[in-house]
Image (tube, rainbow, N blue to C red):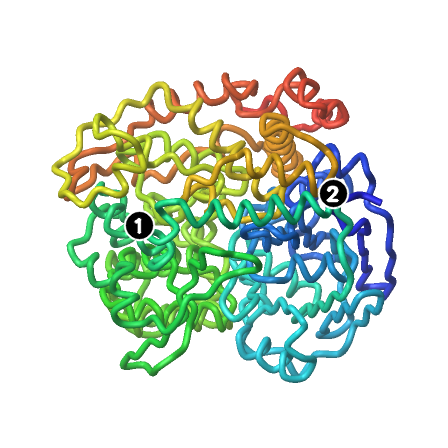
Amino acid sequence: MLPGYAGTILRIDLTQDKIAKQPLPAEMAHSFIGGRGFVAKTLFDELPPQADPLGPENLFIAASGPMSGHFMPASGKTHFGCKSPATGGYGDSNLGGHFGPSLKYAGYDMLILTGRAPQASLLVIEDERIALKPAGDLWGMGSIATEARLKAELGDAYQILTIGPAGENGVVYACITHDFGRQAGRVGIGAVLGSKNIKAIAVKGTGSIPVADPKAALTEGLNAFQAIRTKPGFTGWTPEGTAGITDWINRVGAFPTRNFQTSYWDQHTQINGAAILRELKITDKGCYCCPTPCGKYGKARTGLGDVYVEGPEFETISLLGSNCLIGEISEIAYANYVCDELGLDTISAGVVCSWAIECYEKGLLDRETIGRDVQFGDLASVVHLLECISRREGIGDLLAHGVKTAAQKVGQGSEAFAIHVKGLEWSGYECRNAPGMMLAYMTSDIGAHHARAWVLGHDLAGSSGSVHDLIASKGKRERLPKSEVTGRAANVIASQHLRPLFDLLGICRLQFMELGFEVEHYERLFAVITGNPLSWDDMLAVSEKVWHLTRSISARELQGFGRAWDYPPERFMAEPIPDGPNEGHCISRAEIDILLDEYYDLRGWDRNGLPTAATLERCGLKAVARTMATWACHGDG
């Protein structure tokens, strides 16, 4: 028995229709904790090198953490992993809701799918009973519609993952949807599930999870819930959720606008958190055991129709909103709903659509190719592109490959404003005057994603006091001075260990990040749940190990992987911001190299951005160090 864990890995070979259950190795639990750690360890050990991301040899992994499903705040996270169709390297994504706890209650810490089902299928897990059922009648349905139908047929107790047409058709940024609006959005995890002919996974768990000290766990859980309520952000942050940061992001000139051409938009008050409360919201919506529900469920009324939707979150506001110049919150919510139903990541979809519209404006794509006139600020243009992408029809077949590949095919200078790193589209923060955040995007192991490290406040705080004070301030910011480039790497690395640690534990980080919930609560809860009294520093050391491991996986999978894969798009290095608080600011190629050199040195990587043998061995990855020495990409410049 492993306290805190269900204790079993469920493996299903879809090609052979074989099911295997194996004990979760204690050494794996101790060395990699859970969630993202289990994903990385399994991919390194079991993924065939150079596997086709959309081939049967790729792995689809769902993993919980030791704190998932327990009586503590926000313990509902599930982590997913695969070789990413978007980047070709290491890929993972996560979502909240209730799936991870249900999987553990059914008896499983991990679900690993290999092979490909011979027909469109539904995977049903109810404790010990596992069945693969035909789902041809579900193929082609939207994600939300599929979940509603399965809930009606199976019962509300089932927790369900679905994909939409985008996942079925192999769009490389297709997502997984759960709980009518929660997504594992990044890296194309939905396309991997679709490539295995799995339309949905339904789980019902009725068991329990062993706990090292149940009485102490109950006490510590109650204390944690009570402590959360005393935090200033408990009532200040929750009402608007992540959308509440919109005004501040615009005020400091980090709001992606018009395909990242600029970083400030004077229409931001029409699409911020207050606009959601004013025009959309019906109720709050939270995940498993969450006392601070950040989801906002509401109704959007538009000229294209009325829809009910969870959201939009800040990332959707920035990428489908300001970045596409959609200036009404109801229209952003409608685009959000379309993405949810089609099974598209709203971040990547927003970047791809804005790139396509800019190409059209510049004459690089014509009306015949796109299928209609498209323009910034027009919801119908965005919806047309989204629908084409999900079906891979017309222009959608090009755009379904992601902005990196699409730009390579279109050429004519369009690569300069294809906003991505490593093939993953950039999320919701413009960084030409935020070198630390720029570095965080550049070195994120899955591609350009903010969730790995968020240091924007530290970049822009300057002499204005603490980061939290700066974000909370309501005063107008004048033009900001040029930010210093040096000295950023240490803060980025610390954040890259801290934020992903929550992905190992199986809990949401927002209570810590947004409310300032103390790490002592997590230490005590981990100890009484697992019986393993790890300090916070001990846990961070595991998170660091996983960081080196994920970088090593991409080095194995991508020929020539290294420094060249970490550079940002040319727009950020060549085009000064035209207006707003950061007007005139840009970050040069030379400054990018300073950031990378400092980062690689502090990481213990070589100047090509690959972990050295000494670093891998120091972190307990001797087997990785031995294998890495044989990879042809090592040392390539």
Distance in Å between CA atoms under marks 2 and 1 = 39 Å
Question: SS at mark 1?
Answer: helix
Residue 249 position, x and y percent, is 27, 46
In this orientation, does residue 364 appear?
yes
Residue at 72% x, 28% y is: 624
Residue 464 position, x and y percent, is 21, 30
Residue 527 position, x and y percent, is 68, 36
In the image, is residue 56 above or below residue 632?
below
Left or right side of 222 for 333: left
Image quarter (top left, top right, bottom left or bottom right) of the N terminus:
top right
Q: Which residue is mark 2?
A: 213
Residue at 72% x, 39% y is: 41
Q: From the viewer's side, name the closer residue of 66 and 44.
A: 66
In this orientation, does residue 559 appear?
no
Q: From the viewer's side, name the closer residue of 410 and 163.
A: 163
Q: Earlier in the sequence, mark 2 or mark 1?
A: 2
Residue 21 is drawn in which quadrant? bottom right
Residue at 74% x, 65% y is: 205
Which disc number belongs to residue 277? none
Residue 520 is drawn in which quadrant? top right
How busy is the neighbourhood of tag 2: few (under 14 within 10 Å), some, or many (20 plus)? some
Mark 1: amino acid? Ile
How busy is the neighbourhood of tag 1: few (under 14 within 10 Å), some, or many (20 plus)? some
Which disc number belongs to residue 245? 1
Mark 2: amino acid? Asp
